[in-house]
Amino acid sequence: MTAIPVLDRKRKLRPLVITMGGKRQEYISDMFSHPAMAAYFEPPVFSPGVPQRELRNRMGLMTHAGKAGIIPQAEWDALSSPQAKILNEDDPKTLFEVLDDVPVEPGRLGGESDVKLHYSIELWQKAKGINRGRSVLACSLAHLVAMRTLVEDGYDFILEDNVRAPITKPDGDDIGADGRIYCECAERIWRAKEASEECETATQEKCHLRYYGWLGSRPNLEFVMNVHSPKMQFTRKEEGDDTQSVFPFPIESDIQDYLGQGDSLSISATEGEIREKVDNTKSKKMTKPGGSPIWGAFAYWVSTEGYNAIIKSLQNDVGAYLWKGKRMRCYQVKPIDKVIPRRITASFSVTRKNQDGRKHIHVTTHPAFFRAPMLTSQIHSQWDSEFCRSSEYQMNQCNQDVCEDGQQGWCHLWLTRDESDIVEHRANHGNWLTLTELAEVRATQSSS
């Protein structure tokens, strides 16, 4: 792959990182301090995460929802007033009395009884009992705050603090053809941005959401990388030996349409195997693609129009992110990685049925960021090893290069010492260790 000299792009990229602080923030700072990263990126600016415990009371939830921009302005003005603070201090249950003189926003979606309430009251009534979903809501609000900062202050992309960047070239060289220090992460970002802009010019359809990092289950990755991307990706005019481009956001019906053509054949052309027809409901591991083709909101950019469309749709319908089935006791929270693409797709589609708004969402064929190996998920820790399994496949498909000693592409990423040791253990022993298990292995080795 012939690299376009990144320094010719004149400016450094500006990352905005969502974090709760601590070691995760330190590691992100260390990663961007690497000489290759520092040459092409400004030091990261951190956007604060939202502590889920602060969403347990009225004022805490309203404060963070207001900062996220989803509460209608008239209601937020009242809830952030000195009078609201006094009411909350005297008796938190009286907080919403401050809305008595504020008219209910007309035209909202929802049940007949819901739309008669102020948005803030409907939000509280549905969110107060979400229990385990509170961490998901906190994550969503943190992303909405970061999106507002990105569009207002002109950052180049948003990251979560669980990512790691590819530093070296796939061939392992850290010096470019021009003799300058090389950074694979920056190269991939610029190529994705340039491909996206070329696509905008060619199609006259603006990109409103661009993914610089994404993931999915292993079967879904096989579908996306071997079927959807080759078929749908934008063909660049002067591509040469640069194979990186962008493709429109895949949706569940893409998988259904493909399987309808004959699901007996494997979609993994690189493996050349025949897949068994397995009932996924009876298997612990997915063997066929299904559900959301890709997920994750750990590396992306959103346009001002895209951000405004997201906020407008959320302000118009609490049910866009809080929902409950007929037999459910509590409301469930829709994860932000599902909310963002669905809201943009719906907002920019000609009709709701055809979902052509997804053409305004560009996904890079070569991710510039990957999820850190075995970094304990704040929400889905039970899937940490599967995240790693998917990341390995994705890296190898992009690099067409496997690291020495069986490290499956991890050697190209900036990793902490613990993460490097976990990857090495995986290569030598075949299993993934949690950080706690790694500490136990080290203790055993030191005592023997």
Image (cartoon, grey):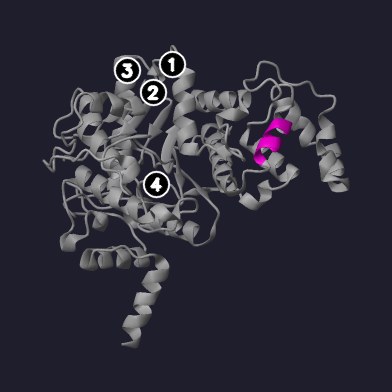
Return the x and y of residue 246 as percentages of the image width and height. 29, 30
Q: Which residue is mark 1?
A: 349
Quick one: 317 or 77, which is closer to the camera? 317
Residue beneath disc 2: 358
**Residue that label 3 marks:** 201
In space, the residues marked 1 and 4 are separated at their CA atoms by 35 Å
Q: Is residue 239 above or below residue 144?
A: above
**261 lies left or right of 91:** left
Mark 4 falls on what kind of element? Answer: loop
Element marked by disc 1: loop
**Which circle's residue, 3 or 2, is located before the other in the chain?**
3
| Residue at the extreme left of the image, as rendered | 272
Residue 389 at what x, y percent from top left?
Answer: 29, 52
- 56 sits left or right of 338 in the view: right
Nearest to the eye among marks 4 and 3: give it.
3
Quarter of the rendering containing residue 107: top right
Q: Main secondary structure of the magenta part?
A: helix
Kindly identify the residue that appears in the image at 26 percent across and 45 percent down.
394
In the rendered structure, which amino acid carries the disc numbered 2?
Arg
Alpha-carbon span between mark 4 and mark 3: 27 Å
Q: Residue 415, image x and y in percent?
A: 34, 60
Determine the image quadrant of residue 411.
bottom left
Of the pair 244 and 322, the residue shown nearer to us = 322
Query: Dot 4 corresponds to which residue?
Result: 41
